[in-house]
């Protein structure tokens, strides 16, 4: 995921969402930084790669191919209340899934990437 502010993104993914930084590497000759964050280490499960290009002056166009990430939480309503307290933007308030059995909510990260919050199937 390309990020316009690494500090803002790390604050969101670590402080607000509770992930940990598992690796951060700066590439001075390429003028970018790669940071891997996740709930478990890189060898144990999925991590997100956050890429910050040092000289990018404007926001990136994500195009029309991006959908969203999905994170499982035990209680979407409680998670949503916490995220609202943190000032996180919602694109869909928590509610039952249409034609389904889950409770869902959708939020945006600081760069506008959409993240789905969902509860385990009941």
Image (spheres, rainbow, N blue to C red):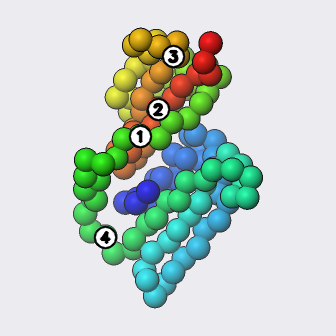
Q: Earlier in the sequence, mark 4 or mark 3?
A: 4
Residue 6 percent location from the top left of the image: 47, 60
Locate the C terminus and report the quarter of the image it occupies: top right
Look at mark 1 in the image and give the residue it sits on.
68
Q: Earlier in the sequence, mark 2 or mark 4?
A: 4
Q: CA distance from mark 2 to mark 3?
A: 10 Å
Look at mark 2 in the image and give the residue it sits on.
116
Residue 103's tag is 3
Q: Earlier in the sequence, mark 1 or mark 2?
A: 1
Residue 48's tag is none
User: Quarter-wise, where is residue 90 in the image?
Assistant: top left
Q: Are marks 3 and 1 in contact (CB under 8 Å)?
A: no
Taking the spot 49% from the left edge, 59% from the top edge, the residue there is 50
Residues packed near mark 1 inside 10 Å, few (<14), some (14 to 19) or many (20 plus): few
> Comparing marks 4 and 3, which lies closer to the viewer?
3
Determine whether the residue tagged by mark 2 lies in a helix, strand or loop: strand
Q: Are marks 1 and 2 in contact (CB under 8 Å)?
A: yes
């Amino acid at each position: 995921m390309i990020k316009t502010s690494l500090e803002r993104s790390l604050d969101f993914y670590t402080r607000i969402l509770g992930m940990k930084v598992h690796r951060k590497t700066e590439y001075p000759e390429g003028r970018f930084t790669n940071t891997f964050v996740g709930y478990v280490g890189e060898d144990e499960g999925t991590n997100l790669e956050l890429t910050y290009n040092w000289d990018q002056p404007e926001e990136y166009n994500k195009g029309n191919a991006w959908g969203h990430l999905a994170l499982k939480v035990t209680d979407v309503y409680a998670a949503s209340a916490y995220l609202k307290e943190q000032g996180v933007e919602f694109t869909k308030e928590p509610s039952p899934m249409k034609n389904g059995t889950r409770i869902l909510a959708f939020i945006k990260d600081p760069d506008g990437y959409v993240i789905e919050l969902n509860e385990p199937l009941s």
